[in-house]
Amino acid sequence: MNLVGKVIGNRYEILEKIGEGGMATVYKARCNILKRYVAVKVLRDEFTTDEEFIKRFNSEAQSAASLTHPNIVSIYDVGQEENIYYIVMELVQGKTLKEIINEDGVLPWKWSVNIAIQVASALEMAHRNNIVHRDIKPHNIIITEEGIAKVTDFGIAKAVSNSTITAFGTTIGSVHYFSPEHARGGYTDAKSDIYSLGVVMYEMLTGRVPFDADTPVSIALKHMQEKPVEPIKLNPSIPLAINKIIMKAMEKEISLRYQSATEMLKDLSMSLKDPEGNFVKRNSETMQYTQRIPSLNDEMEEEKTRKTTDKKKKGKLATYFAQHPTAKKVWITVIAIAIIVLIPLIGYGATKLILDGGKAPQVALKDVKNMTVDEAKAAYKNDKVNIEIEEVHDKEVEEGKIISQEPPYSEGKTVDENSTIKFTVSLGAQKVEMKKVVGMKFDEAKELLEEMELEVEKIEETSKTVEKDYVTKQDPEEGEELETGDKVKVYVSIGTGIKKVNVPYVIGETESSAKKKLSDLEVTVVYEEDTTKVNGKVLKQSIDAGESVDEGTKITITVNRIEAIKTGTIKLNLKSLLGADSTIDTDPETGAEINSTVNLRIEVGGDTVYRDTSRKDSTDITATASGKGTVTVKIFVNEVKRKEVQFDLSVANPVLVID
């Protein structure tokens, strides 16, 4: 169904088709009441008899119309006219994010994060209103000419409740951006949108989707089963924090993802301030096992039980001695003998210790350096000493061998029996994983690597793309395993090596004169029309005069181009245009002509240029058209539009023949 030229809802004049989706066609229209341009989404013909699709279409309107947010396309109206179901929404001038990715490939990380923040803000608003989008993808994100992101097409959004399952029992949308639970047809909620936003960020920063295959089913399986390649491995310029945000958003396990758009927004905002920061936390890091904490009543009950038990024991002992008086005498005698025997023994031991000068039995230290722990313990096998082990990393001493002992060994040195000897055992060289330092200032990179106990070799080089004192590359690469003490090479920019030039002032110059003055720069010319300014002169320049920039920097100049008004001739064969309707009837009695004329009106560019009563069989009606470039010519007969054509006035001696 082609609706161009029709008016629906008695107010929306359809001007042109601007897009087509899976279940609807989008038109640009003019609201004749509010005098503004709008977008009208019309349900495709094949779905107008499908009640399920109509319900879904209405659901989109009802869900999205309740949302008011600068990053969500506004819904103005919804209606039905005969078999036409339509939604009227804000007309956004710009490109879809998918078009931008296709044109530019990998996008700058700061720009990408800014877009992700705007989309997350839109989702935050929707989720607060219990609305899940379920189809977040670059195709549904429009970037305006001012750089504002607008989320559109709540085609499968549905107000959610505690029992909501994937809407309509089928998977709808682009499988490249599905969450695992969406792909398997399971429960979907706000965290499914977060997963899809993670995929969108992945594509913006790498120029590709994380999972791709020949069939949608294969892609869905990858979402459910495979771990994506970390985006930082595909694009090393991605900051560490951004990489972690994307990977957390794309966790397959829902509990490990961001639990809300608000939580993701917090990390995205922080990443702009600290792009290499370590603030993105895995949810598992904060999980704790459930513990039972005894209550005060429990402790009081335990104390009461203990006292009762002690009392019972004392009571039983007293009862036993009362019943057996002889046993009590025997116990008293045994205790007395023990005291009489032990006191002299204690005195003898003290006397002997004094006579020996207070010196305890001695154990000779052994030289156990470079022995294994088992070998060292065997050396002290027959000695009464306590062995304590401490393990440390040591690049020089083999793993498992003793580095030293405390007290340290020397020939003839002894220690007291029952002393503690501590063995320091080597764990071998400590392994460290090389960190990413590309993009960091050299001083920061050096500090980081020295904290890892690595030796840094600085190599200076010129760079046309990296600012002075920043790291351009590293050897070894990020993720490689090293040992403490290893040397790493860090290449550092000493400047661009590109000549600097001052931008001249060219506003008011002719195009050729401006290009000549800007010869050190790469000039791009755009044109616009301003009838208040001189034709052919520069209206503005993208870089202000006086700024110092690299030679060859791109600069755009805007040149005033006032298009001349041209006049052309319209020749109309009314008889041919009307066809069978051009027949003139006669009165059978009088022979007089009946209904021989019509009201003819010709409209050019919205203005009426010809209005008259004309005979139906006229073949040579002439009108004049004026305008710029190509204009639209409409022919109305008795105020019914019979013809609409385009008239190019830019050619020499333009003539439009209509028959």
Image: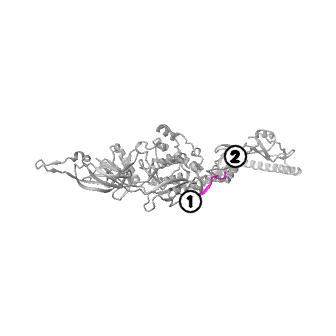
Could you tell which of marks 1 and 2 lies nearer the N-terminus?
2
Q: Position of residue 536 (x, y in %)?
A: 47, 58
Q: Element at badge 2?
A: strand
Q: Residue furthest bottom?
A: 532
Mark 2 residue type: Val
Is residue 496 covered in magenta?
Answer: yes
Rendered image coloring scheme: one colour
Q: Which residue is mark 1?
A: 504
Q: Are marks 1 and 2 in contact (CB under 8 Å)?
A: no
Q: Residues within 10 Å of mark 1 (few under 14, many from 20)?
A: some
Question: From where the camera sits, is residue 195 visible?
Answer: no
Residue type, numbered disc 1: Pro
**Left or right for 49, reference 360:** left
- Residue range in magenta is 493-505
Specify whether residue 420 is in view.
yes
Examine the structure image and report whether residue 445 is included in the region drawn in magenta.
no
> Mark 1 or 2, which is nearer the eye?
1
The N terminus lies in quadrant: top left
Q: Residue furthest left?
A: 589
Residue 173 picture location, percent across and down? 44, 44
Nearest the eye: 515 or 147: 515
Residue that numbered label 2 is attached to:
488
SS of the residue at dot 1?
loop
Q: Residue at x 31, y 47 (%)?
A: 83
Residue 485 locus on image (x, y percent): 73, 46
